[in-house]
């Protein structure tokens, strides 16, 4: 399985095939946009024909070139310019809005896919890279999705019509002139491929730079505590210089690209000047025809230049699409099995049967043939040394990871037979690493249950022992907690996270060091609330403070060898084993 960040490269054909379905619901807009593009192209191509008619008529039969004829031609051109203006407005506005909507659809799909990826993906992928993929990388998709069909459609029309008209004027001169185009196309394609690779590396480095900034700013207290500001500046400067070098190389390819196209522009005009002059000297082309020919060639060269300039935007867009596809192709490791059922009103009987598990990224073995039975309503505590698998065991029940062998059952049914959403809705977790969202206290507690009333939120806070300190805050429940809750103390954040679980009111509780950040008084208050909440519910508690689990129905000692001791607080002390050692050591440290 692909458990790490997907860095596979894709061919342009495959990227376009993956991108084209996003046009489907906007097909009417695309078709009207292409119609408008055709109208603007026709308006542009008619002018040389008018100039050719006036020039040739004036030189061959000036008497027939009356004011009325000129006014009619002027009126025709005025109508064409009005049509061109309306069509151009539609292309510039509606076309860009369509591009923005496609970008929005892609960002929605990418975010939805990210929500389905397992913890393993996030353990191996920098958040800065992920954010870059769903923000900056998709910005260029707006221009790409609008201009790509439009520019190539216009170029196709102009190339075909110009070739036909130029061929009718002078087929020999046209073949001479168009012989330059294949050489120019091959040269530009070679430079274009190198430019795309440079854009790809530029996108990756932007993600690295974002990750570096995020890591440094979120850890700014640690940076200051260890006076490592200069060290962080040096690391940032290294990434910043790397980005500079990559961008410098990108601009080198862009300059080479633009210089090459200008050189070929000059070559085409040189061919036109010399060959066209010679053709006119020998009477193979009329002066008026040569004037029209020059105007059509100018239009054709402008079109080629526009396509070539669009190539930069094209490569930016293709790079953004590639980075998007890399996200969408990251494997969803945790998913509902076919025929999965809803987990409704579980009693809470939990069993692990010969469970083996190792982390898929580093293959660190955590469990081999682990067996465990937890009865409905039982309060079970898990203790043991760090790295013994306590938190991992609790992460397997809500399927944050999937086991390698064996099965985990809830009420006698394999948890894989339940839908993930309904399974997790019946499990409440208070984790050791408390995470609060940027918002108010009220919003963070209400996150525990959708559509909860304000009274229910306040009641949950009271049961978690959080109501008093919340009402003492400046804005009470409407107090802004800051990013990741930085405006609150560790104990306050912990109690708010516990209040979320009280509001959720699940039949199964998992408390991973739930009281680790609380002072003695707060711990006592929360412990009483947890005891009330745990009544009649299955509760799994991970704790280092042995005093907080003395009242558990059963205590498990989990080490790298599995569950090595099991019993009540008193029976484990009587065994004089590992638990007894933990207990004695904890008392000596007081």
Image (spheres, rainbow, N blue to C red):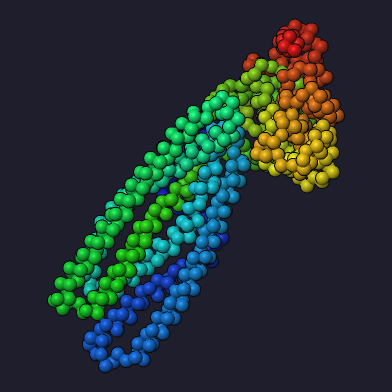
Q: Is residue 243 left or right of residue 402?
A: left
The quarter of the picture where residue 41 lies is bottom left
Q: Is residue 50 left or right of residue 415?
A: left
Residue 32, horizontal then vertical, whole percent: 50, 69
Residue 492, horizontal then vertical, whole percent: 75, 32
Residue 311, horizontal then vertical, whole percent: 38, 55
Q: Residue at x 28, y 92 (%)?
A: 64
Q: Is residue 107 left or right of residue 310?
A: right
Q: Which quadrant: the C terminus?
A: top right
Q: Residue at x 28, y 52 (%)?
A: 187
Residue 153 position (above or below residue 509): below
The quarter of the picture where residue 151 lies is bottom left
Residue 464 position (above or below residue 438): above
Q: Is residue 343 visible?
A: no
Q: Residue at x 43, y 50 (%)?
A: 316
Judge by depth and name the residue closer to the eye, 431 or 505. 431
Which residue, as the protein is rendered here, is positioned at the far left?
282
Which residue, as the protein is rendered here, is positioned at the far bottom?
63
Judge by depth and name the residue closer to the eye, 564 or 351. 564
Q: Is residue 270 visible?
A: yes
Q: Residue at x 53, y 37 (%)?
A: 213
Residue 333 position (above or below residue 569): below
Residue 452, horizontal then vertical, whole percent: 80, 45
């Amino acid at each position: 399985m692909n458990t790490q960040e997907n860095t596979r490269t894709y061919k342009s054909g495959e990227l376009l095939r993956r991108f084209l379905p996003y046009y489907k619901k906007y097909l009417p807009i695309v078709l009207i946009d292409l119609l408008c593009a055709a109208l603007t192209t026709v308006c542009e191509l008619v002018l040389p024909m008018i100039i050719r008619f006036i020039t040739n008529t004036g030189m061959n039969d000036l008497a027939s070139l009356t004011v009325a004829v000129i006014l009619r031609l002027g009126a025709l051109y005025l109508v064409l310019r009005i049509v061109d203006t309306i069509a151009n407005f539609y292309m510039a506005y509606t076309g860009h809005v369509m591009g923005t909507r496609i970008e929005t659809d892609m960002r929605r799909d990418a975010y939805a896919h990210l929500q389905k990826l397992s913890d393993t993906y996030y353990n191996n992928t920098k958040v800065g890279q992920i954010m870059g993929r769903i923000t900056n990388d998709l910005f260029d998709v707006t221009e790409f999705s609008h201009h790509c069909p439009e520019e190539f459609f216009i170029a196709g029309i102009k190339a075909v019509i110009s070739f036909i008209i130029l061929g009718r004027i002078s087929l020999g001169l046209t073949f001479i002139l168009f012989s330059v185009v294949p050489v120019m196309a091959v040269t530009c394609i070679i430079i274009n491929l190198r430019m795309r690779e440079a854009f790809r590396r530029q996108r990756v480095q932007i993600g690295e730079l974002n990750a570096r900034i995020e890591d440094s700013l979120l850890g700014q207290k640690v940076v200051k505590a260890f006076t490592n500001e200069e060290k962080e500046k040096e690391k940032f400067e290294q990434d910043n210089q790397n980005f500079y070098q990559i961008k410098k190389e990108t601009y080198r390819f862009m300059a080479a690209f633009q210089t090459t196209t200008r050189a070929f522009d000059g070559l085409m005009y040189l061919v036109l000047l010399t060959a066209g002059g010679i053709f006119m000297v020998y009477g193979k082309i009329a002066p008026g025809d040569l004037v029209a020919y020059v105007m059509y060639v100018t239009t054709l060269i402008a079109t080629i230049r526009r396509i070539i300039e669009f190539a930069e935007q094209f490569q930016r867009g293709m790079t953004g699409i590639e980075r998007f596809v890399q996200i969408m192709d990251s494997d969803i490791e945790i998913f509902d099995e076919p025929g999965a059922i809803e987990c409704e009103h579980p009693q809470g009987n939990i069993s692990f049967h010969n469970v083996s598990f190792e982390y898929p990224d580093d293959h660190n073995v955590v469990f081999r043939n682990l067996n465990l039975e937890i009865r409905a309503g039982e309060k079970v505590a898990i203790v043991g040394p760090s790295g013994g698998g306590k938190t991992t065991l609790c992460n397997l029940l809500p399927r944050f990871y999937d086991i390698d062998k064996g099965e985990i059952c809830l009420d006698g049914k394999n948890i894989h037979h339940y839908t993930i959403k309904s399974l997790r809705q019946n499990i409440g977790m208070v984790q050791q690493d408390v995470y609060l969202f940027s918002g108010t206290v009220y919003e963070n507690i209400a996150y525990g249950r959708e559509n909860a009333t304000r009274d229910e939120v306040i009641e949950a806070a009271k049961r978690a022992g959080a109501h008093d300190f919340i009402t003492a805050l400046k804005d009470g429940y409407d107090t802004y907690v800051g990013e990741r809750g930085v405006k609150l103390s560790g104990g306050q954040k912990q109690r708010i996270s516990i209040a979320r679980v009280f509001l959720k009111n699940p039949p199964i509780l998992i408390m991973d060091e739930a009281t680790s950040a609380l002072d003695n008084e707060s711990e006592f208050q929360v412990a009483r609330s947890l005891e009330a909440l745990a009544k009649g519910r299955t509760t799994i508690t991970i704790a280092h403070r042995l005093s907080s689990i003395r009242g558990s129905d059963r205590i498990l000692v989990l080490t790298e060898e599995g569950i090595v001791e099991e019993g009540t607080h008193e029976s484990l002390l009587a065994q004089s084993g590992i638990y007894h050692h933990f207990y004695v050591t904890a008392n000596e440290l007081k």
